[in-house]
Amino acid sequence: MTSPAAPTRSPGLRLGTIAGAPVYLGRSWFVLAGILVIGAGITLNRLGAISYLVGAAYAVLLLGSVLVHEIAHALAARSRGMQVKEVTADFLGGHTSFVTSSGSPGTSAIVAVAGPLANLLIAAAAWPLQLWLAGQPGLQIAALVLWGLALVNVFLAVFNLLPGMPLDGGQLVMALVWKVTGRAHRGWTVAGYLGQVLAVGVVAWVLVRPLFLDGRIPRLWEVAWVALLFRSMWQGASAAKLRGVVLRALTGRSAADVATPVTYLLPSTPVGSAATAGTDVLAPDAAGQPAFLATAVEISAVAAQRPETPLSGVLSRVDLGAVVEWAPEDPAETLAARLAGLGGRLVVLTTATGRPWAVIDARRFDAAVTAHLATARRG
């Protein structure tokens, strides 16, 4: 039977489209906005009620700065032939996800540095303007807001350039090690370890430093914020290390070693005929794009009872992530690096003529290769 792909939960409020990808405002961002407004109201209480308006302005400018940062990543990726999936701003900042990953260290570096560079350009424009406004009668509040804009953009640039995953600086480390050694897995592994060190360092800086240097107990909001940040950074660094393990396991292997072979047939083909192929079957939709899949077991079970049944009776719609031209003998390590970030999607591999010959389930790919590596170690 056929069925539509399972719906995915919206990342939040859709703001528009950039570089062909949707831009979302995550629901958790409103929590961050509330914290900024209240924090400004307390810190700038000398301004009275205006302090809360300043906090609201800070929140909006921070959102704009984060979106500019992420959009810079997206545009740089698009210029290098990468397909952008979505851009999201949320409580912990923002992130840009891609349908396909970069295929070279140079592309990785260009995409990574684009975000911090955009923030530095904003800071460079805001700083002299706030200096001028500070000297104008009645414009001190506007100068204060622009001072905050310059400061937050310098912070975003510097923090994101710290050398560890999942930060942009970690991507630069990964690209550098990949370029020097010629092995992507080494870059991911080194950047992943550095990211874990950075995560611990952030906790020490925010929580331990005030205790020993300032003699004060960290505030509750500081503890909550750094806990969320640590969790995000540690998970990102761990994912990078896993990517390194996967890529190392694929060294010397071909795409045919890791992909699932398929036979490409029309949905009207009788299952009795399809069963003779002995493989999973991929079928196109009305537009001619690969869209449906049936396993060899499913086909054989129906063929044994009703061989005249058309394939459409056993096909299921797949969550198609990408169609990639990749020959069976091409290296699996390079393929895996290109497929990073596809999440739970099916990747169709085609020959140079465009005919599908295999599929890779991105949901199980990393886990399967890691399990293979663990088995090899025990053996």
Image (cartoon, rainbow, N blue to C red):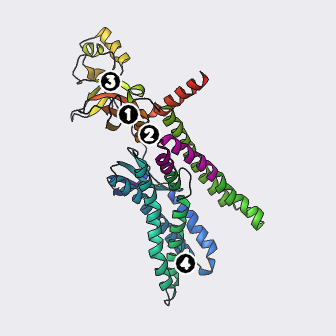
115 or 135, which lies in front?
A: 115
Real-space Cα separation, disc 3 to disc 2, in angstroms: 21 Å
Magenta run includes residue 183: yes
- In the rendering, at what x and y percent does residue 204 appear? 69, 56
Real-space Cα separation, disc 1 to disc 2, in angstroms: 9 Å
Earlier-in-chain disc, 4 versus 1? 4
Magenta run includes residue 182: yes
Residue indicated by mark 3: 262
- In the rendering, at what x and y percent does residue 152 appear? 53, 68
Residue indicated by mark 1: 346
Q: Please name the amino acid that badge 1 sits on.
A: Leu
Query: Residue 84 has which mark?
Result: none
Real-space Cα separation, disc 3 to disc 1, in angstroms: 13 Å
Real-space Cα separation, disc 4 to disc 1, in angstroms: 52 Å
Tell me the residue at 32%/24% (across/down): 262
Query: Residue 343 has which mark?
Result: 2
Q: Please name the amino acid that badge 2 sits on.
A: Gly
